[in-house]
Image: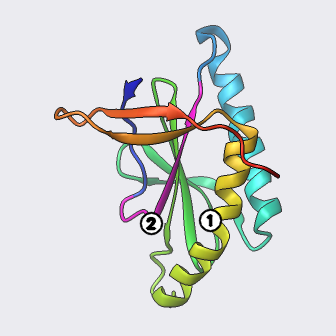
Amino acid sequence: MGRSVSYLKDALKISYINFETEDAVYNEVWEDFKEELIESLIKICPSLDKLHTPVWDGNETRVIVENSHCQIGISEHYGLVSISIRVHTDYRTNENLAINWINQVWPKIDTMITNNYQALKKLGNFSNGEGVFEQIKPKNK
């Protein structure tokens, strides 16, 4: 499967999800998916806060939750979704502490994504920049 999707600038970790639905119900299903994802992220990391006003990172990626260490963003392009995390750009953020925190929490987030959604592993890119992915089997809970 060859596709491409945006993700947060300076992302430390990225997970991919196959998200395909009927065009007629796309907006409703997409909004429900985002809300469910946000709830799951906050359940894993209670220090995360939902952003009620969109924070856009470039043209396609939206920051959906953040805390003093990180920002987590989501982007979708033709059924391919990226969930990415980066060090918070706040001037008060200690970068080394934030990177350590991200490295500790991301495996839990990645496992949740793999177990709850159609997670994909990026195998590489074609010369035109299009990504190649394969589906990941759920991890043990």
Q: Amino acid at mark 1?
A: Trp
Queried whether the magenta region covers residue 129, the answer comes back as no
**Splitting the image into 4 quarters, where does residue 3 fall?**
top left
Quarter occupied by the N terminus: top left
Q: Which residues are magenta?
A: 9-19
Q: Residues within 10 Å of mark 2 (few under 14, many from 20)?
A: some
Mark 2 to mark 1 CA distance (whole Å): 10 Å
**Residue 11 shows in the view:** yes
Residue 123: x and y, percent?
39, 40
Residue 56: x and y, percent?
45, 52
Q: Which residue is mark 2?
A: 12
User: Residue 134, relative to residue 140: is it above or below?
Assistant: above
**Element type where label 2 sits in the image:** loop
Residue 4: x and y, percent?
36, 34
Who comes first in sequence, dot 2 or dot 1?
A: 2
| Residue at screen point 57% across, 74% down | 103
Q: Amino acid at mark 2?
A: Leu
**Splitting the image into 4 quarters, where does residue 69 fall?**
bottom right
| Residue at screen point 70% across, 25% down | 29
Q: Which residue is mark 1?
A: 106
**Splitting the image into 4 quarters, where does residue 57 fall?**
bottom left
Q: Say left or right for 127 vs 52.
A: left
Is 64 or 37 nearer to us in this picture?
37
Answer yes or no: do the residues labelled 2 and 1 have beta carbons within 8 Å?
yes
| Residue at screen point 18% across, 32% down | 128
Q: Residues within 10 Å of mark 1 (few under 14, many from 20)?
A: some
